[in-house]
Image (cartoon, grey):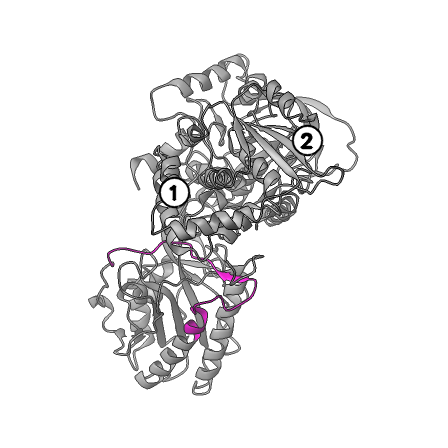
Amino acid sequence: MSDAKTPARILDSYRVGKTPLFLVGTYDNGVTVFSQQVRALNLIWAAVESDFVSCSPDTDEEDHNEPMKVAIIGGGIAGLATAAALMKKQANAKITIFEQRDTLLPLQHGSDSRWLHPRIYDWPGEGSSASVAMLPVLNWTAARASDVVVQILGEWKKVIDEHGADPPRLFCNARHLQVDEPKGGGNGLDIEWVAEERRPHDGTQTTGLTTAKGATENFDIVILAVGFGLEKDGALSYWRNDTIGQPSLDQPRRTYLVSGQGDGAMIDLLRIRISQYRQDRILDELFRGRDKLLLRLKELHTKHGVNRDSGLFQSLENLEKNPVYMKEFEDVCLALSGRLRRDTDAVLHLLVRKFSDLFDPMNTKISFQNRLLVYLLYKCGGFVPSSQRERSLIKQHSIPQDCIVRRHGTYREEQLEEMLSEPLYSAIKSQRTGLGAATLSQTDGILWPGGYFGIAGKLSSAGKVDDPGRAEWRKEYLPGPTALLAAAYCGALAGALRADHPGPGRLRVTLHRAVVFGPDELLQQCCEYFGTSDARGGASSAARTFPALNATIGLAYRTRRIVRSLRAVSPELLSNAMNSLDLSAASRKMASEVGFVMAIPILEPEQAGLYTAPNPVAGVVYVDSAGRDFWIDDNDVARIVSMTNEFVRGLNGDTDPFDKIRNVPLSSTGGALPEALSLPPDVANALELSIVQPPRVSGPFQFNFDYTDFITGTT
């Protein structure tokens, strides 16, 4: 890990000087629901791993430190994610949440005209079409904003219930709230408020408390997760319901004025001019199947979106002149022209004089996919850009007040200045204008290791978890369709193996998928164990993650060969081999009676550009047995390989094999192949590499089948 990404350095990017005040995403651009959740989880990862916040598993029994008092100001997405992460890590903390409005998640509550997608702002990057956030805390799926609220609150209630005693306190309608240094010195920060105490599960009224109360209390940490404040110029909030995306019922054609040059303005312009507009759907309809153009757009996204180089407008102009992309570009414009609404016109009111200047990163912070869609709309004559005075445009085009959409930003600074004491607000301004790295700008890249929020306490405390706890720890999101496919395959394989399996003795079969969560290569168990009646324990083991370098499955992943225990090897030697492969670092200890293990990697083409980075292994089949003298010889291994080849061939065809289910790639294809390792000498007395070749797929492949509401097989 680079010095810039150590927990201590990351924590500093949230912290205001040396005060106990922290800001989440307040000064970042391109803020989304998903990115704010990531920033919140990164904050708690950094706070726990740098020992700024202690957790129960990290504290000795004789250590009776008082719980840290943590105030989270803001009951929105970032605030709930922060509180939930503290509870998942079993932080030694008493949490209090303050929300200015009447309920949790107030902005998105009841918002039916806004569609939320967790990854669309990364389009066309790998994984951007995945409709699930795939977060370990407060996970959700793309939907209307109001429905996402229901999903997140459902997950929030689960976290509180799992946390048990001492849930967070919640105060809503906090119309008066002031944060200040303690009078006469002292530690922490004082908060003075007038608010109503509510049930933390859902923000509803607590029994017997019907009025607000005023109070002052000292907190060890104060975390501001307040968003950006109200919108300027009296504009209707971005999250309030409107009808601009619906056909007009009272006029044959209406002209709208959209004023602004950020993402909010661009989205409203697109809603006004494109019928049945939804960001993820229109991108899928326009570019699905146009592989050459999409590949070029991925290159432009890296250059102009990720790296924010100038020149995007000219790069897009060049597409229709380049013979490689010309036909597909024309088809995209034709398809978009067919989707233009015939009951609306639009004027885009800008500060910049030239429309092309809107694409300069020095002028705007519009996301790549919105710049692309607005550019295509411009090529189709879908609106008129203008930098004339707003009043002149309204008069010139006879635009009524209810057809004016203003997206001029929010009162972010005013909100902070009103809430914080003068010294605290001055410290923020000083930090923002300083030359140091701590400018309160935070990455939205995932920094915590895979499975981190499935383990209480610091990562170094994982060794304290007992075997029952390890049976269901380190879990990450697992798509339901992927789990179902894995269960069908493993159930069939287990049934075939049981025919020759001696009894008594346990037999277990499961499948792991190779996946990258955050910075880590992991193998994730895709389904429960199948086999004998005692194959499964009391806890669910599906969705657990294991470091891709550990145990038998990790050895198959690294060698890209079928790994099998030697015939008639003693359980003692096999157990020693597992210890050498760090099995217990991420899993339970191997049962003492197990005498056979086998791991079969499912390989992608071992050729640059034809496998999914970082390793050409799509998954690993795992088998173990405690049956006496049970062993699978090469002939039977070959039959399992043949069965597995047919399984993956059916999943990796030219078309999507299932309606409403799509295999969404999460990683890009890899370049130079990583070296395949040999069998380590210290396990050669227990394990061997089979001469049978592993099963293979014909191209890049990942086990990430998930639901989609797109109609598959269309362009």
Q: Is residue 259 left or right of residue 667?
A: right
Of residues 43 and 514, which is closer to you in this image?
514
**Could you tell me if residue 176 is visible in this image?**
yes
What residue type is disc 1 on? His
**Could you tell me if residue 75 is visible in this image?**
no
Residue 660 falls within the magenta-colored stretch: yes
Of residues 678 and 334, which is closer to you in this image?
334
Magenta segment, prevailing SS (helix, strand or loop) = loop
**Residue 464 disc label:** none
Q: Is residue 636 left or right of residue 153?
A: left
> Above or below — where is 601 with respect to 194?
below
Q: Is residue 291 left or right of residue 706?
A: left
Residue highlighted by disc 1: 301
At a point 51% along the width and 71% down the height, the residue shown is 487
Q: Residues within 10 Å of mark 2 (few under 14, many from 20)?
A: many
Query: How far from the left and from the top, in percent, is residue 653?
Result: 43, 70
The quadrant in which residue 502 appears is bottom left
Sequence-first disc among 1 and 2: 2
> Above or below — where is 87 with respect to 603?
above
How many angstroms separate mark 1 from mark 2 (CA)?
A: 41 Å
Q: Residues within 10 Å of mark 1 (few under 14, many from 20)?
A: many
Of residues 389 and 100, which is closer to you in this image?
389
Residue 81 falls within the magenta-colored stretch: no
Circle 2: element type: strand
> Above or below — where is 298 with respect to 502?
above
Stretch of the chain drawn in magenta: 647-673
Residue highlighted by disc 2: 172
What residue type is disc 2 on? Cys
Query: How far from the left and from the top, in percent, is residue 287?
Result: 46, 52
